[in-house]
């Protein structure tokens, strides 16, 4: 069945879309690096009991690689790009990771249909219409950082697929990703004398939902419906963010953003309709056993 995989991706994107409001609040007082480390720290600590479930597997290295290049390198490159060129340029450039991910999915043997390619392009267009990043600035460093972030994100998501193929469960993938990125970022902040944690129970819960539940749900979606479709589905997060901001009265939606919402909705419809031409088999590990949760 593919429905659990579809819903898992949508729930993950909803979580990621909503926690950004809390993160933004603390970034203003603590800075992006401290906020990033804090969420990694809370997830690594609160989810530590899953260590007893871990068995040796090459997939663990893939999960760790995913955490480092996505949560550490990719996210910080994205923040840097926003600082240098503004969100209106950084967001659509970075969201080209969806298109790159389609190529990696193809390399891993997935069936990437023309509808998925069109859907990927529409997502990038929709994000560019939705994003209001303030003043746009021209900067080769900022543009380069955004494009490099896109590559890091796509590689990180591909590594999640590799971990799943090796039989690593979604919850362990989520934990290893947070732990690996948190250790390296913690060492960096300690060396710089800036190591500290956001002290807030609400922040800790949000972090657990974000990098714990959200990451595990995405890994489960990749396992069930594939990398190509999952990356498209979770990319509705900017749309959910804007809709929540409108409903809560934080922002007003412009006509351009409404058009962006329509484009993203169309992209999701096309992506889901492509399922009819995709094989609906349950993925298996190298030994031939099902990756189905017990």
Image (cartoon, grey):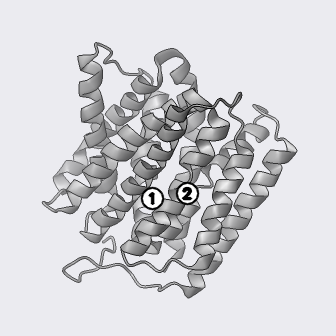
> Alpha carbon of mark 1 to alpha carbon of mark 2: how far?
8 Å
Residue depicted at 39% across the width and 69% down the height: 223
Residue 50 in the image: state x and y as whole percent. Answer: 24, 50
Residue depicted at 74% across the width and 48% down the height: 129
Task: Looking at the picture, tell me which residue is in the foreground, 204 or 92.
Answer: 92
Residue at image mark 2: 234
Among the 4 quarters of the image, the one containing residue 76: top left
Residue depicted at 44% across the width and 58% down the height: 217
Instruction: Name the residue furthest left.
Output: 56
Among the 4 quarters of the image, the one containing residue 118: bottom right
Quadrant of the image containing the C terminus: bottom left
Residue 282 in the image: state x and y as whole percent. Answer: 38, 81
Residue 286 in the image: state x and y as whole percent. Answer: 21, 78
Instruction: Name the residue furthest front.
Output: 140
Task: Using the rendered image of the protein, determine whether residue 288 is visible from the camera's viewpoint.
Answer: yes
Task: Looking at the picture, tell me which residue is in the foreground, 249 or 274.
Answer: 274
Residue at image mark 1: 218
Residue depicted at 30% across the width and 65% down the height: 162
Q: In the picture shown, does residue 171 fall above or below 27?
A: below
Mark 2 residue element: helix
Circle count: 2
Instruction: Name the residue furthest top.
Output: 193
Q: In the picture shown, does residue 88 fall above or below 159?
A: above
Q: Earlier in the sequence, mark 1 or mark 2?
A: 1
Residue 24 in the image: state x and y as whole percent. Answer: 57, 28
């Amino acid at each position: 069945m593919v429905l659990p995989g579809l819903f898992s991706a949508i729930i993950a994107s909803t979580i990621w879309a909503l926690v950004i409001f809390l993160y933004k609040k603390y970034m203003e007082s603590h800075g992006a690096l401290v906020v990033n480390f804090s969420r990694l720290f809370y997830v690594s600590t609160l989810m530590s009991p899953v260590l007893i479930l871990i068995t040796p597997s090459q997939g663990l290295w893939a999960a760790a690689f995913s955490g480092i290049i996505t949560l550490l390198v990719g996210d910080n490159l994205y923040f840097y790009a926003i600082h240098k060129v503004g969100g209106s340029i950084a967001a659509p450039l970075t969201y080209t990771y969806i298109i790159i991910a389609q190529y990696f999915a193809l390399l891993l043997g997935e069936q990437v249909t023309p509808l998925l390619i069109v859907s990927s392009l529409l997502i990038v267009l929709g994000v560019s219409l939705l994003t209001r990043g303030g003043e746009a600035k021209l900067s080769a460093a900022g543009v380069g950082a955004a494009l490099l972030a896109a590559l890091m994100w796509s590689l990180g998501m591909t590594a999640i697929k590799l971990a799943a193929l090796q039989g690593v469960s979604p919850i362990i993938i989520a934990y290893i990703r947070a732990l690996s990125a948190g250790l390296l970022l913690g060492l960096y902040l300690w060396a710089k004398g800036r190591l500290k944690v956001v002290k807030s129970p609400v922040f800790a819960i949000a972090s657990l939902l974000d990098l714990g539940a959200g990451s595990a749900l995405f890994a489960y979606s990749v396992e069930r419906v594939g990398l190509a479709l999952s990356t498209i589905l979770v990319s509705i997060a900017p749309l959910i963010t804007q809709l929540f901001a409108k409903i809560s009265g934080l922002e007003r939606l412009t006509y351009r953003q409404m058009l962006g919402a329509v484009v993203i909705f169309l992209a999701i419809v096309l992506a889901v309709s492509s399922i009819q031409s995709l094989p609906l088999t349950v993925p298996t590990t190298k030994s031939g056993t099902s990756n189905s949760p017990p």
